[in-house]
Image (cartoon, rainbow, N blue to C red):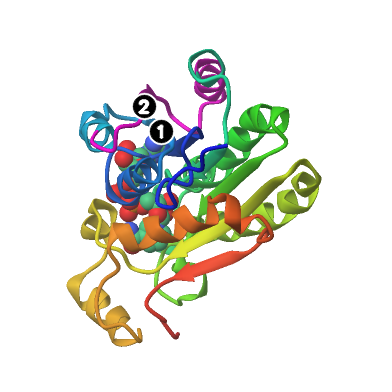
Amino acid sequence: MAQEPAHRPLAGQVAVVTGSAQGIGQAIAVRLAQAGADVVGADLVEDDQTGALVAQAGVRWLSHRLDVSHGSDIDRLAAAIESECGRLDILVNNAGIDDAIRFDELTPERWHQVLAVNLDGPFRLIKALVPLMRRNQYGRIVNIASGSVVNPMPGFIAYRASKMGLIGMTRAVAIDLGPDGITANVVSPGVTATPMVQGSLTPEFLEMTIGKQGVKRSGEPVDIANAVNYIASPEAGFITGQTLMVNGGAAF
Ligand code: NAI
């Protein structure tokens, strides 16, 4: 049988990336496409830019609008993948919202909103899409958490709770899904230059953070995408339930 070239190890596979319209999600979608996967981009907003970048890699692109906190949107996504692609190999739960709010301003409503997007969303997506992976007894789930879980900083109360929950949930589902050939891991980015960071962190905080890293620069979305690409590859099949910190060696 002819072998795929080493640089396209995901040829013939289908990957879903949530939050693919910008930032880290866009870089992940493009990286997986360069590795040969067809990509389903799932985001709140129209995603033409990512689609154009993915198409340059010569793979198939499907854009799906959804809110990961809405169960009915996720059911529609699962049905679309089933009818359009007929298989699913990789799920990257990247969509997330941050939350620099301090304790006194944090309302229960905002708390629930952050948890609904950052934790309930990934759980619902895993529930809805694992049946497609089980058909081929193969799957790679990569959940994007955050280096902030170990980084003492003001605010981000609901955010950090959601990302800690995501890490715990990933470790647990990894055990349950392992017998089906499905791995589940976390990639935890350090500070990464995206619209999210530009909107919520001060230049002073960014400078302080970089000062505590071994590598003296902000992370770029492609740094995170390269890590996801490895964890999502067939050769990472004995790695599951783990959290990979991609943060320039940040020490707090
Ligand atoms: P971003 O804000 O630049 O992009 C997030 C994308 O997710 C946007 O396209 C947005 O439309 C989409 N999205 C938001 N809520 C959604 C929902 N309910 N349903 C569907 N799509 C939704 O964010 P960025 O920086 O690219 O972050 C991506 C992930 O990486 C997030 O989970 C974030 O928590 C995590 N992260 C980012 C860090 C950074 O420094 N940028 C550091 C640590 C973690």
Residue sitting at x 50%, y 44%: 93
Q: Amino acid at mark 1?
A: Val
Q: Please report contact status of discs 1 and 2: CB closer than 8 Å, yes or no.
A: yes
Question: Where in the figure is residue 124, as x and y percent of width and height?
Answer: 61, 34
Residue 43 position by quadrant: top left
How many residues crowd around disc 1 within 10 Å: few (fewer than 14), some, or many (20 or more)? Answer: many
| In magenta stretch: residue 235 | no
Q: Is residue 225 visible?
A: yes
Q: Amino acid at mark 2?
A: Arg
Q: Is mark 1 within 8 Å of ligand 1?
A: no
**Residue 157 appears left or right of 87:** left
**Mark earlier in primary sequence (1, 2):** 1
Of all residues, the one furthest to the top in this rendering is 83
Up/down of 161 relative to 4, above or below: below
Residue 198 position by quadrant: bottom left
Residue sitting at x 65%, y 53%: 170
Of 69 and 2, the residue lying toward us: 2
Q: Which residue is mark 2?
A: 60
Give the numbered dot on residue 177.
Answer: none
Q: Which residues are magenta?
A: 56-80
> Which image quadrant: the C terminus?
bottom left
Q: Is residue 98 visible?
A: no
How many residues crowd around disc 2 within 10 Å: few (fewer than 14), some, or many (20 or more)? Answer: some
Q: Which residue is mark 1?
A: 39
Up/down of 149 relative to 162, above or below: below
Of 2 and 46, the residue lying toward us: 2
